[in-house]
C-alpha cells in the first residue's frame, strides 16, 4: 500500500516467490495483472535480484541503481519503482536528481513522484494451522 501527498492511496498485491541468499533474494512474480500499477515491478523468468550499495545486482550495466537511487530494491534498469529510497517530509524537492532518490512507484504518480507513505507486507502463500 502507498499514499501520496494529496491523501490518495492505492494497494497492490503480488503473488511472489522469493529466493534465498544464494540467488541474491531473487524476486519472482507468480502472476501478472493488467493493472498499470503492477507494471512497475514486472520481472523476467529469472527474477530480479535485490541490489544494495555494495551488492550491485541490477540489470543496468552503466551504474549501480541502489547507489544512484539511494536505496536497496529489486531494480531492473533503475527508475520504475523504489520503496526503499529517501523519505521527503513535505513538498518534494524541485530538482529531478533529488526527487529520483525518493520513494516512488512510477506507474502510479509518475516518474520520481516522492510518495508520502508505503507499507510492504510479505506473508506465506499457505498458512498451516498447527493447533
Image (cartoon, grey):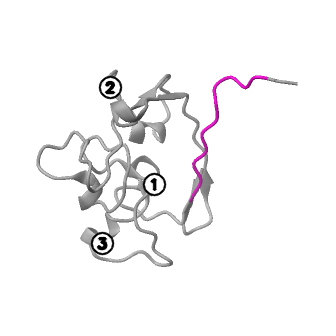
**Disc 3 crowd, CA 10 A, few/some/many (<14, 14-19, 20+):** some
- Residue matched to label 1: 83
On the rendered structure, is 17 left or right of 50? right
Q: Residue extending furthest left? A: 62
Which region of the structure is painted magenta?
Answer: 118-128
Identified at 22% across, 39% down, the residue is 59
Between marks 1 and 3, how big is the CA–CA gap? 15 Å
**Disc 1 crowd, CA 10 A, few/some/many (<14, 14-19, 20+):** many
- Residue matched to label 3: 98
Q: Which SS class for mark 2?
A: loop
Q: Image height check: is 101 above or below 62?
A: below
Between 118 and 114, which is closer to the camera in this rendering?
118
Find residue 74 and report its image quarter: top left
Residue 127 horizontal/vertical position (percent)? 73, 26
Q: Image height check: is 8 above or below 6?
A: above
Find residue 102 and report its image quarter: bottom left
Find residue 12 and report its image quarter: top right
Residue 98 horizontal/vertical position (percent)? 30, 72
- Residue matched to label 2: 44
Residue 21 horizontal/vertical position (percent)? 39, 35
Q: Image height check: is 121 above or below 109?
A: above
Q: Quadrant of the C terminus?
A: top right
* Precedes in sequence: disc 2 or disc 1: 2
Identified at 54% across, 66% down, the residue is 116
Q: Is the Cβ of the residue at disc 1 closer than 8 Å to that at disc 3?
A: no
* Precedes in sequence: disc 2 or disc 3: 2
Between marks 2 and 1, how big is the CA–CA gap? 20 Å
In front: label 1 or label 3: 1
Between marks 2 and 3, how big is the CA–CA gap? 29 Å
**Disc 2 crowd, CA 10 A, few/some/many (<14, 14-19, 20+):** few
On the rendered structure, is 73 left or right of 125? left
Q: Is the Cβ of the residue at disc 2 closer than 8 Å to that at disc 3?
A: no
Amino acid at each position: 500500500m502507498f499514499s501520496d501527498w494529496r491523501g490518495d492511496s492505492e494497494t497492490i498485491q503480488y503473488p511472489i516467490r522469493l529466493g534465498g541468499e544464494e540467488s541474491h533474494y531473487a524476486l519472482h512474480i507468480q502472476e501478472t495483472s493488467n493493472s498499470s500499477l503492477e507494471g512497475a515491478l514486472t520481472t523476467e523468468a529469472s527474477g530480479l535480484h535485490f541490489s544494495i550499495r555494495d551488492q550491485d545486482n541490477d540489470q543496468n550495466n552503466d551504474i549501480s541503481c541502489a547507489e544512484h537511487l539511494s536505496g536497496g530494491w529489486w531494480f531492473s534498469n533503475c527508475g520504475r519503482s523504489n520503496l526503499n529510497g529517501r523519505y521527503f517530509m513535505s513538498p518534494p524537492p524541485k530538482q529531478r536528481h533529488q526527487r529520483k532518490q525518493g520513494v516512488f512507484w512510477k506507474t502510479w504518480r509518475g516518474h520520481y513522484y516522492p510518495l508520502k507513505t508505503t507499507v510492504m507486507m510479505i506473508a506465506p502463500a499457505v498458512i498451516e494451522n498447527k493447533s
